[in-house]
Image (tube, rainbow, N blue to C red):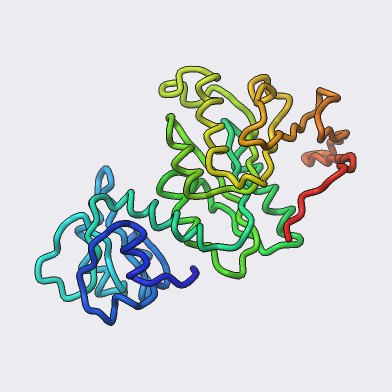
Amino acid sequence: MKNMTLKEIAVACGGIYYGDDESYYKEVSSVVIDSRKVEKDCLFIAIRGARVDGHMFIPQTIRDGALCALSEKRIENASYPYILVTSCEQALKDIAEHYRKSLNLKVVGVTGSVGKTSTKEMIASVLGEKYNVLKTAGNFNNEIGLPLTIFNIREEHEVAVLELGISNFGEMERLAKIARPDICVITNIGVAHLEHLKSRDGILKAKTEIFLYMNPNGSIILNGDDDKLSTVHPANGIQPVFFGLDDSTHQIQPSLHISRFRENIWFSMHLPALPQGMHWE
């Protein structure tokens, strides 16, 4: 990850630093929440889980080489630096938001009811032909996984393709505040998480919260074949670009041919040239 000092971290999360002055200006090598992944000079954030409280591992992480720990509890007579915070989970997000703002790269945010991971992988594969790309690993797409993904971005990365997954209102806004995408891609609006979002209209409302913190000069790319996404109006002055197979009004409408040979499926896709492309420089 890009250099970040303990002073910078404490300010970013509103924490109180306890430790020696020399360590206060040292840089962390990485940010971890899993005590088994501690490396030299990392920052360990003690997350309280459903079954395990990360605070119980703080002494061990310091012995294993961590430079500092974030804790919700006062650590009496600590012989190592730590930062006291109200909530380690919120601090994780605050630090990731600060770190993201310091980065000079393009971010593609991918969400939708289904197809997020496949779409993320395809976008990263295509962009990887030209750019140094970081992508979300596995399904690290929630309020814990996204910050950890952000911390993996290094100065040499030119593009980050980030998957954003939610199950309730407000989550996408919090994720978007961290990711601050330049390009937003929504695959579809299905019926996942209806227990919280109540209806497909609710899901649409929750998913489109991704627009709240996007680059005002960015792009919105939506599945125009989805009956809910096709109703989305310009957001923050950004006119959505629709793709799909059915409607001739879509700006991106490929001609798709699929052939099956034994167990393999081959396809070719012919895309019309667009009058104006996206410039990444």
Q: Give the quadrant of residue 129.
A: bottom right
Front-most of residues 250 and 196: 250
User: Which residue is situated farthest in the left direction here?
Assistant: 76
Query: On screen, 226 above or below 150?
Result: above
The count of marks equals 0
| For residue 192, above or below residue 58 | above
Residue 275 left/right relative to 77: right
Residue extending farthest bottom? 22
Residue 81 rendering spot, x and y as whole percentages: 23, 72
Name which residue lies at 59% across and 48% down.
Answer: 181
Q: Residue at the spot x=79%, y=41% of the render?
A: 264
Choose between 123 and 9: the one closer to the eye: 9
- 40 relative to 167, above or below: below
Q: Is residue 184 left or right of residue 63?
A: right
Q: Nearer the viewer, residue 234 or 175?
A: 234
Q: Where is the C terminus found, in terms of image quarters?
A: bottom right
Query: x%, y% of residue 207?
Result: 54, 32
Name the residue at 22% across, 78% down: 20
Return the residue found at the far front: 237
**Residue 124, position in %: x, y?**
67, 53
In this rendering, would 154 be left or right of 280?
Answer: left
Q: In the rendering, at what x and y percent does residue 243 appear?
A: 76, 33
